[in-house]
Image (tube, rainbow, N blue to C red):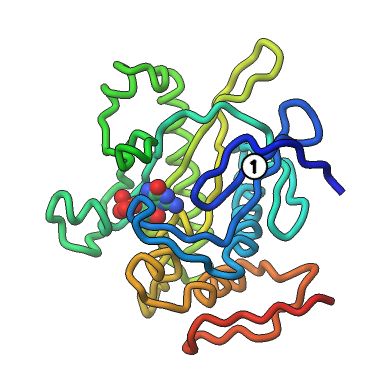
Amino acid sequence: MIHKGKKLYEGKAKIIYEGPEKGTGVQHFKDDATAFNNLKKSQIEGKGVLNNRISEHILKNLNQIGIKNHLIKRINMREQLIKLVEIIPLEIIVRNIATGSLTKRLGIPDGTVLDHPLIEYCYKNDDLGDPLIAKEHILAFKWATLDELKKINDMTFRINDFMVGMFRGIGIKLVDFKLEFGRLQEGDKQEVILADEISPDTCRLWDVVSEKKLDKDRFRKDLGNLIEAYQEVANRLKIFPEQHNITEVKFNKPTSIKIKKK
Ligand code: 5GP
C-alpha cells in the first residue's frame, strides 16, 4: 500500500495528492467527464480506470524511446505514482488531421489531412478558456524559456511520430492530442519532462476503416458508448484488466460496463 498525503490539486478529471516520498505525488483518475470548459459535466463509471491504464501504457512506451515523463508506476486501478513537477502553464496541441477548434476557427474542411503535424499553443487557464496563443506570448510572459520551448517542440514531434505509428498499428488514426510538460528539479539540475496524461480524454482517435470516434468527442458530441470506445482502444493496445474481470462490454447498447471483482 502506498501512502497518500494531502490533496495538492484537483482538476476536472484528476486529483494530485502528496506521494510517500519528497518529490513524488499520487495522480488519481476520476470518472468525471467535462467539456466546453466545464459547461457540460457528467460522471462516467469506469472512465478513470481505463484512462489510468491507457495513459500508463503510452507513457511507459514513451519512456522506452527516451521521452522522460513523470510516471513512476501505476499503483492501483485509479492511481499512479508520479514525480511532482512544476507544470508549465501551456497546452501543447498537435494536429495531424484538421477537426475540432481548428476547423471552426479557420474554416478548414473537417478531416483535411495535414502535410506536416501542426503544433498549437494554448495558455492553460480555465477562467480564460485556455486561449490560443503565439510562441511570442510564451516568451513575452515568461511562461517558458526559448530553450524549454525548443525542447518541448522536439519532444512533441517525437511523441507524435511514435504515437501515430503505435495507433496505426492497431487500426486507429491519431487525429490530434494535447500534451502538458513540467519542470523537474533534481538537485541543482532542472529539466523539462512530459507530465499529465495521454488517453482518449486528451486525444482524438478515429477508427481507420469506419472513422468511428474512439475518444472524448463521444461525450462532447453526445454520441454515447464512451466506455465501450475507451475499452476498444485498451483492447486493441492489448491492455487487459488485471485485478478485475470485465464481463460485459457491448458497443451498441447504452453505456454499461460490468466489473466483477476476482
Ligand atoms: P480542440 O482544440 O480541437 O478542441 O482540441 C484539440 C485536441 O486537444 C483534442 O484531442 C482535445 O481532446 C485536446 N484538448 C485540448 N484542450 C483540452 C483540454 O483542456 N482537456 C483535454 N482533456 N483535452 C484537450
Residue 15 in the image: above or below residue 211? above
Image coordinates of residue 200 in percent, x first then y, are: 49, 61
Between 158 and 195, the one lying in front of the other is 195
Examine the image and state in which quarter residue 146 appears: top left
Circle 1 packing at 10 Å, graded few (<14), some (14-19), many (20+), is some
132 displayed left or right of 153? left
Residue 234 in the image: above or below residue 161? below
140 displayed left or right of 155? left
Per the image, label 1 sits on a secondary structure element best described as helix
Residue 119 in view here: no
Image coordinates of residue 44 in percent, x first then y, are: 53, 69
What residue sits 45% from the left and 39% below the top?
156
Residue type at mark 1: give it. Asn
What residue sits 66% from the left and 38% below the top?
7
What residue sits 26% from the left and 33% below the top?
133
Residue 181 in view here: yes
What residue sits 61% from the left and 66% below the top?
237
Q: Mark 1 points at which residue?
A: 63
Q: Does the residue labelled 1 lie within 8 Å of ligand 1?
A: no
Image coordinates of residue 86 in percent, x first then y, are: 56, 26
Examine the image and state in which quarter residue 111 appears: bottom left
